[in-house]
């Protein structure tokens, strides 16, 4: 969610990332835990705390902020459903181009990512020689 907040004027003014001030390491990396985090897991507090913050962040991005909403994705494989975000639990993200799809669509579709295919075609067309006949 950080990429949405660092480019959002409203989120920066509201200092939303400071909601994690006691756990700033989660802003940069979700694979590192402090001793306090481990104690809070044991006591049952970490999950509740992070769920509350996640809900607040998701509300800003998906409901409250038009700029953040505009950065959402439509599944190019089925073109159905709501706007998707990379942090949604039912989505998958292309590792090459970062496009977001419904998880089921992504794994059911064994072909390449539509966005990657488009980008590859565009690259090929840019590097092709123009078919001009210079013999005339």
Image (spheres, rainbow, N blue to C red):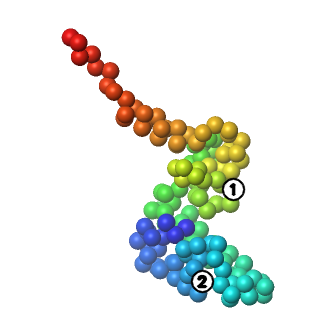
Q: Tell me if I can see residue 21 in this picture.
A: yes
Disc 2 is placed on an element classified as helix
Q: Position of residue 105 (x, y in %)?
A: 68, 44
- Residue 46 is tagged as none
Q: Residue at x 58, y 58 (%)?
A: 85
For the N terminus, the quadrant is bottom right
Q: Is residue 37 left or right of residue 29?
A: right
- Could you say which quadrant of the image residue 78 lies in? top right
Q: Is residue 5 left or right of residue 126?
A: right
Q: Nearer the viewer, residue 74 or 116?
A: 116
Q: How many marks?
A: 2
For the C terminus, the quadrant is top left
Q: Position of residue 10 (x, y in %)?
A: 44, 73
Q: List the residue tagged with mark 1.
A: 90
Q: List the residue tagged with mark 2.
A: 23
Q: Is residue 88 left or right of residue 126?
A: right
Relative vertical location of residue 136 with respect to residue 40 in this rendering, above or below = above
Q: Residue at x 45, y 70 (%)?
A: 6
Q: Position of residue 18 (x, y in %)?
A: 52, 82
């Amino acid at each position: 969610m950080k990429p949405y907040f660092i480019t959002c004027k409203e989120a920066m003014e509201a200092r939303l990332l400071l909601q994690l001030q006691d756990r700033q390491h989660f802003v940069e990396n979700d694979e590192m835990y402090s001793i306090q985090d481990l104690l809070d897991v044991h006591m049952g507090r970490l999950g509740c705390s992070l769920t509350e913050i996640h809900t607040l962040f998701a509300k800003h991005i998906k409901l409250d902020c038009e700029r953040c909403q505009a950065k959402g994705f439509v599944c190019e494989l089925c073109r159905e459903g709501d706007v998707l975000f990379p942090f949604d639990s039912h989505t998958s993200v292309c590792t090459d181009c970062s496009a977001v799809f419904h998880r089921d669509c992504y794994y059911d579709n064994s072909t390449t990512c539509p966005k990657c295919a488009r980008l590859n075609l565009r690259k090929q067309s840019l590097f092709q020689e123009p078919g001009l006949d210079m013999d005339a």
